[in-house]
Image: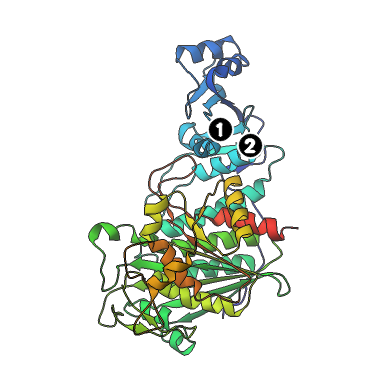
Amino acid sequence: MRTPQGLVSTPVLHPALIESASAAIPVIAVQGQNWSIAAARFGSLAEQFAKAQDYSGKDGTCLCLPDSNGQIIAVLFGLGEGTSEDGVFAAGRLPQLLPAGQYRLDSGWPDPEMAVLAFVLGSYRFKRYKQNNEQPRQLVVPDGVDGHSVSAIAKAVFMGRDLINTPANDMGPQDIEDAACALADQFCAKLCVIRGDDLLEANYPMIHAVGRASTRAPRLIDLVWGQANHPKVTLIGKGVAFDTGGLNIKPDASMLLMKKDMGGAATALAAASMIMAANLPVRLRVLIPAVENAISGSAFRPGDVLASRKGLSVEIGNTDAEGRLILADALCLADEDKPELVMQYATLTGAARVALGPDLPPFYTKNDALAEQIMQLGRKVHDPVWRLPLWNRYRTMLDSRIADINHVSSGGFAGSITAALFLDRFCEQAKDYVHFDIFGWTPTARPGRSEGGEPQAARLTLALLQARYGH
């Protein structure tokens, strides 16, 4: 058990934001031909310069307007279709397009708060191994925008990205624990960690079985924050630091991105950071089973039958489906607490990517009203997800002749659904339960979202809890 250290730090603005700057350069969002009207505001020289550059206000294009001394007096930025997904994040392009300096949003921005968040998210760089010395681009927080709230969200997203982007040699189970410890210290939360063979004594047999082949001990990380009389909300994140596939070893190409198999843990920690920074009136619990699915003489095998915390015997159909095993033990623990809401995040199945691609994680819940609220909030905060069904007829695909259940389906169909159905067996007492099958990665850079790790559904989680408990 780790007890809280120190006091919660005073909120500070993200380094990409500033409170004010008298000489900040205005950035004007233009669409189509209205660029000429905007340019004319700064005199005939600026307007003629834009024409000479053949500027058209095309989506994502940026033009710095000079004065008679060659100094930048304003910036035109082509917003394009501002309501599209990339259009909403369009300001995320600015940190790459603008010269170093201080800027402020001027006219034409339909959602200034989203533009500020996009700008900050677009300033992200993964610097652990390769430093860059570029000078900062900073944005003045506009009137009516809560810069500290935006900063807290961005810092949490950056933390999640950093965790996922860090390769497994520097992001093992202990490093995931260290990240949880740092978060607990920052927000005066309590942290308890059960490691190695102690998992067996504490009755987490599947977490132990999946992680026992690694020289880096498996563990269950348990963080608790908030007042005991507040609504119980539990977040669970899959923390597989690296997934070789176990004895069902992955081919080379499938192993290249397996450092991101702890993306669920990163998402749970990012969401927790946002929730605690917002000081929401919830009793928050974060459970992370952290393991490395390695290969050695002690590795669990296809055909093994494992005990589970719930008491169900589980036949192993494929050691490369290890995530649902460790989540099942953690989910059973969460369920014992009878929380109002359990939200679980896991880079669980390739089937989810085949169905919906990398940008749109599927989610599962039995509560239709909650599902609709999640869909609507995902669209509102531009952290989209899509509901897939817990289709009961597919439960028979998990039947086993020698155990209570097999953890993989007997055929190649409905892989994401059958994984969700397996996990559903381990949650019975929570009032509501939601499972997200995330990708945790942006394969191609987009505005505000660099190529690499991404804690999908973390901002959505904050929005959901604000809607439910923010009053």
**Is 269 drawn above or below residue 319 in the view shown?**
above
Left or right of residue 186, residue 213 in this image: left
Most foreground residue, 260 or 130? 260
**Given the image, on which type of amino acid does mark 1 rest?**
Gly
Q: Residue at x 68, y 56 (%)?
A: 466
Tell me residue 304's x, y (percent). Answer: 31, 82
Residue that extends furthest to the bottom in the rendered view of this protein: 201
Residue type highlighted by circle 2: Asp
From the viewer's side, name the closer residue of 129 and 58. 58
The residue that mark 1 highlights is: 82
Identity of the residue drawn at 62% across and 27% down: 108
Quarter occupied by the C terminus? bottom right
Tell me, what colour scheme is on the image?
A: rainbow
Under tag 2, what secondary structure?
A: loop
Let me know if residue 192 appears in the view: no
Where on the picture, by quarter, is residue 409? bottom left
* Disc 2 to disc 1: CB gap under 8 Å: yes
Q: Residue at image x 35%, y 64%?
A: 168
Percent position (x, y) of residue 299?
29, 79
Q: Position of residue 134 (x, y in %)?
A: 45, 40
Where is residue 232? Give x, y as percent.
Answer: 66, 71
Is residue 411 among what the camera can see? Answer: yes
Residue at the disc numbered 2: 111
Q: Nearer the viewer, residue 458 or 132?
A: 458
> Which part of the image, by quadrant, shows the N terminus?
bottom right
